[in-house]
Each structure stands twice: as structure tokens, then as C-alpha cells.
Amino acid sequence: MTSKHSLPCGVPPPTLLIVEDDKALAAYLSCAMQDEGYHVNCAHSRAMALDFKPQPLLALIDLGLPPSENQISEGLFLIDALLSCEPHCKIIVITGQDEESSAFEAVRRGAFDFISKPASMEDIKAAIRRASLFLHHEEHLSATGEARLHLTVTLADGPRNTADAAEEQMVRGALADTHGNIGEAAERMGMVREHLYYYLKKYGIPLKRA
């Protein structure tokens, strides 16, 4: 039997980050998802969204954010920042501006799903439920020592760059899973700490300070 948020019975839903510059709409979405059992963090800009620590692993983002509400650049920058910090983050974008190209670019950058405006509350809830379930199964994979990678690469760049992209994502994922613990991340990847430090330097990955 599953709960209304579609996770196995007894599994709490992940914290949901809602990023929407329309404060009334953000409050409405927040209340609706709290009724579904989610703990919700609300932000109205990219800067506010990145202030939450720890970063939620589930996000609903309007691409048109201040100071460029009529463009998608702020929303795309936010996708990049969230996934850089937490590669497993499941991001659902809401788009109404040049819908097809906006959705394509968001997914290319690693968004999990997109919703077109105007969207019904049931459509939004269904998308969040799917992302929650997917996140739960990815966490189960991680617990068994496996990882699912999301890669978008340019074929003309060749296999070397593709391998580098996979390598970097594996390192970032291991660090995220172990909350920045170098020893645990190195052990999970089957290497010594010194080798992991090499990859941190290679890909410019900063160490998280307690």
C-alpha cells in the first residue's frame, strides 16, 4: 500500500523546494503540497533558493525568475547550481515562455520533468509524485553501491570528454551521498583518499567545510 505521495508506506516524502516569484501562487502551491505530506521550502528568486541548507532533493521551479522574469536564464542558472551541489536532485520546471525550446533546454541541463502553463494542480501533484518515487528508487540504488548518471554530451567532442563528464558526475554523486565526507566517498568509489583529492582538483570541486 502506498501513501498519497506515492512512496512506500512508512517512507516520508522528501523536502520540496518551490521557486516561484509570484508570492501568492507560491503560497498556494506550498499549502497544496503540505496537504500532500511534503515539508516545503519556498523561495522567490535564485539567491533565496540557494540559501536553503541542506539543499532539498526535490524542486519545482518557474523558469522566469527575477531580475529577468521575461527570460529563462535565471531558472536555467538555478538548475545548474542545484545539480552541481546535489546531482541527484529531481527538478520539475514550469514553463510558459517559448514552451518547447525552454523545456528542451531545461531537460538538456538535467531537469527531471517539465510542466506547461497553465497547469492544473493535479498535473503538478502528479509530476511531483513521479519525481519523489524516482528519487526514492535512486536512493535505494545508492544504498546498494550503484549510481544512475544523467549525461548530456556533444557527440562531436568525442568519447574522452564523455568519459570525463561521467567521471565528474560519479565523484560529485559520491560526495553528495556521503555529505562531503572524503573518506567515505573514496571508499564508496573503491579508491584511496589521495586519488579522490586528485579528481577534486581535476574538476574544480570544492571541499564542503563543516
Image (cartoon, helix red, strand yellow):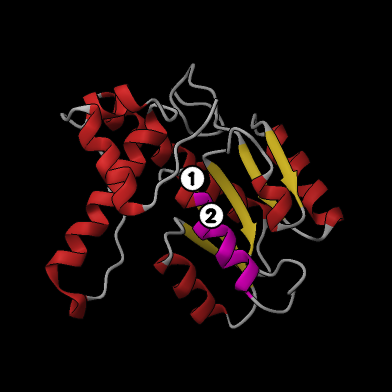
Q: Is residue 14 above or below residue 154?
A: above
Residue occupying image coordinates x 53% and y 50%: 82
Q: Is residue 26 left or right of residue 201?
A: right
Q: Is residue 115 above or below residue 57?
A: below
Task: State which quarter of the image contains the N terminus.
Answer: top left
Secondary structure at badge 1 equals: helix
- In the depicted view, which residue is nearer to us: 138 or 183? 183
Answer few, some or many: residues within 10 Å of disc 1's Cα (few below 14, many 20 plus, some between 14 and 19): some
What residue did someone put label 1 on?
A: 85
**Magenta residues (range):** 72-82
How far from the left and from the top, in percent, is residue 172? Answer: 36, 43
Q: Is residue 196 visible?
A: yes
Residue farthest along the top direction in this orientation: 10
How far from the left and from the top, in percent, is residue 90? Answer: 47, 47
Q: Amino acid at mark 2?
A: Ala
Residue farthest along the right direction in this orientation: 24
Is there CB contact under 8 Å for labels 2 and 1?
A: yes
The tag on residue 81 is 2
Residue 15 forms part of the magenta stretch = no
Residue occupying image coordinates x 39% and y 25%: 181
- In the depicted view, which residue is nearer to us: 114 or 65? 65
